[in-house]
Image (cartoon, rainbow, N blue to C red):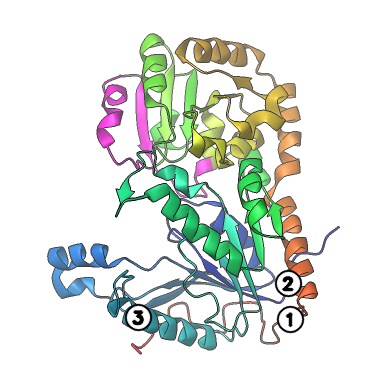
Amino acid sequence: MTSLLSGQAIACFSSNSWDALWRNRQQIMSRLARQNRVLFIEPAPYLRETSVDLRRRGLAALQPSRLTSPLPNLWVYTPPTVAPRSGRRPLSDLTFAWRRRNLHQVLRSLGMEHPILWIFRYDLGEMVGHLDECLTIYHAVDEYSAYALDAEQIAGRDRRQIIRDIEADLIRQVDLVFVTSPALLQTKGPLHPHVVLVPNGVDVEGFARPAALTPPDIANLPHPLIGYAGVLNEKIDFDLLAALAGQHPAWTFALVGPVALRNPDELQPLRRLGNVHFLGGKPVEALPAYVQDFDAGLMPYRLNEWTRNISPLKLYEYLAAGIPIISTPIPAIEPFASALWQADDAASFAQAITAALAADTPDRRQRQQALAQLHSWEQRLETLSDAIQQRLDAEGRGWRNNHFATGRDLVPPALPLPPP
């Protein structure tokens, strides 16, 4: 068995806050903190965001950096809003220097010398080469250029190409690249000699263990209950969902997750249906109880460049919960074709749901949960750890952080940092 990474200092640059919907970075870092010291760095605000907030809230919008400790050996750093990211010099140079100095202070206060930089988005690499790091990792979880589906033009250039150029520049600077899908491996592999495929995973025990109590906002919904758990964004085919729910009023549809649409009006056809229920985002510890109450789990993704590259967390969560899965034919489900149902329009989704409900038995659920065991976060951490240790050894950087200690006693739960 591969030994898990231990004794290291890890500075994780996340594209979302710690308290936001949990994604793979929170899952990975919360587990690595058991044997390493982790600083989870929330994204710095952009100048435009800060300007809008200033007009709305006044000087209260200008906040110093903040440090909290939600878990032993894991600290969450919120950059100061007084030093926002800006693309214009000399302001960009000044605010970067402020952020860098504050981050140095945090790392020193935690005894985190020569950290591993672990970057979770193409545009978060500004600190590479500035923190005396021992190793730098880029973890690609999406094809970010596919977000710009409207191919917006910026100064005569395709926004998608700008994103690709920024990402390629970051890849050239790092020591190791992780990708979450074969499609990402295909596009990032030629850019770097050390690219490793590590799909997303699941907390198998959390989703397989029966919930003590069904949450009240789903407990009284009629069955059969057809569910979706995840962010409601442009990846989802809402026209398909509206047609499916409209044609089958005897089925109840529960959508569990936050809305993150540029045009929320896309949801109006669904909101008008009495058998569709929007339950909002849920804390990570509460989500399994919702998924376990589904009679079937949906993955109604659009088929485009964005979804061709994804590794959906919900795929593994549905597997671990044992519920039947119905999905559009995205590449991520190909290895699991025998364990789920595929459909591409409302009529075939209805047929697949009917078949899935009829086939649902305790034995089938147990076999599905056994499959999920092969895709646990613990399995994924072994792969990640092995790749990281190989790069540390190859670079002659395979030492351990001598200041490592378990527990919270090194730093108080909240440590306000002085301005530089």
Q: Which residues are magenta?
A: 258-287
Quote the CA–CA distance across marks 2 and 3. 35 Å
Give the secondary structure at mark 1.
loop
Q: Residues within 10 Å of mark 3 (few under 14, many from 20)?
A: few
**Position above or below: 113 against 291:** below
Query: Which of marks 3 and 2 precedes in the sequence?
Result: 2
Q: Is residue 342 above or below residue 136?
A: above
Residue pictured at 47% horizontal, 60% vertical: 166
Camera-near label (2 vs 3) is 3
Under mark 2, the amino acid is Ser
For residue 202, side relative to residue 230 (left or right): right
Q: Depth check: 339 or 216 in front? A: 339
Q: CA distance from mark 2 to mark 1?
A: 8 Å
Q: Which residue is label 3 attached to?
A: 93
The picture quadrant where one finds residue 267 is: top left
Element at label 2: loop
Nearer to the camera, 202 or 175: 175
Instruction: For marks 3 and 1, give the one nearer the viewer.
Output: 3
Whether 206 is drawn above or below 223: the answer is below
Q: Residue at x 55, y 84 (%)?
A: 110
Of the 4 image quadrants, the one containing the C terminus is bottom left
Give the quarter of the image for residue 325.
Answer: top right
Viewer can see residue 176: yes
